[in-house]
Amino acid sequence: MNVYIVRHAWAEEPNEARWPDDSLRPLTKEGRAKFRRVARRLGRFGVAPRVVVTSPFLRCVETAEILVSSWQEPMVLETVPFLAPQGDIHQLIEWTRTRMGQLSGDIAWVGHAPDVSKILATLIGGGTFHFAKAGIAAVQFKGPIAAGEGTLLFLIPPSLLL
């Protein structure tokens, strides 16, 4: 099983006057268009999770919706609090183990920086990583998802896919 870790696409700049609640800050028009291209290319390379799980923040939800709409395979889209900023990676892993018992295939997690870097480090047993906006990593598990048990397959910045 592969876990794809995705940092949300390009969002509007923080602005308290426009978005007093930062969780409502959307993707930019250009960010949506660029990420559609990234998502289509990922699909051509065989990246096709069965489940896409996202932070409840709007910019992540919009990124996840683009993933789901860009790929041909039917997918389940779910929102979980564990992917919100400063979410709990161990609860995310446990939730995923429980949920994936009901579904088969790969999964994508859509979240925020710096959390996505910490998630990747937790899954593969350490390291320091930089996720560009709309960056994606793939971690392979031979058995159940567990901290330190994954193998990094790739970490790709979107510039390689545009």
Image (cartoon, rainbow, N blue to C red):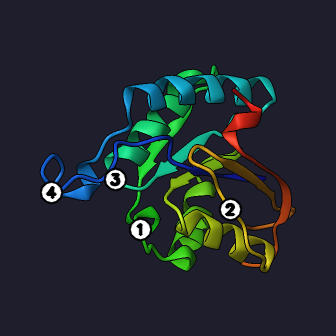
Give the camera-side residue of 13 and 22: 13
Give the camera-side residue of 156 and 119: 156
Identity of the residue drawn at 82% across and 74% down = 149
In the rendered image, residue 70, in percent from the top left (x then y), is placed at 57, 22
- Label 2: which residue? 130
Q: Amino acid at mark 2?
A: His
Q: Amino acid at mark 4?
A: Pro
Q: Amino acid at mark 3?
A: Phe
- Label 3: which residue? 57
> Which circle's residue, 4 or 1, is located before the other in the chain?
4
Determine contact: label 4, label 2, CB under 8 Å: no
In the rendered image, residue 49, in percent from the top left (x then y), is placed at 66, 40
On the picture, is 104 further left or further right than 78?
Answer: right
Of tags 3 and 4, which is closer to the observer? 4
On the picture, is 41 further left or further right than 91?
Answer: right
Determine contact: label 1, label 2, CB under 8 Å: no
> Which circle's residue, 4 or 2, is located before the other in the chain?
4
- Label 1: which residue? 85
Question: CA separation, marks 4 and 2?
Answer: 28 Å
Of tags 1 and 2, which is closer to the observer? 2
> Which circle's residue, 1 or 2, is located before the other in the chain?
1
On the picture, is 90 further left or further right than 32?
Answer: right
Identity of the residue drawn at 46% across and 63% down = 83
- Label 4: which residue? 20
Q: Amino acid at mark 1?
A: Pro
Q: How many marks?
A: 4
Question: CA separation, marks 3 and 4?
Answer: 13 Å
> Which circle's residue, 1 or 3, is located before the other in the chain?
3
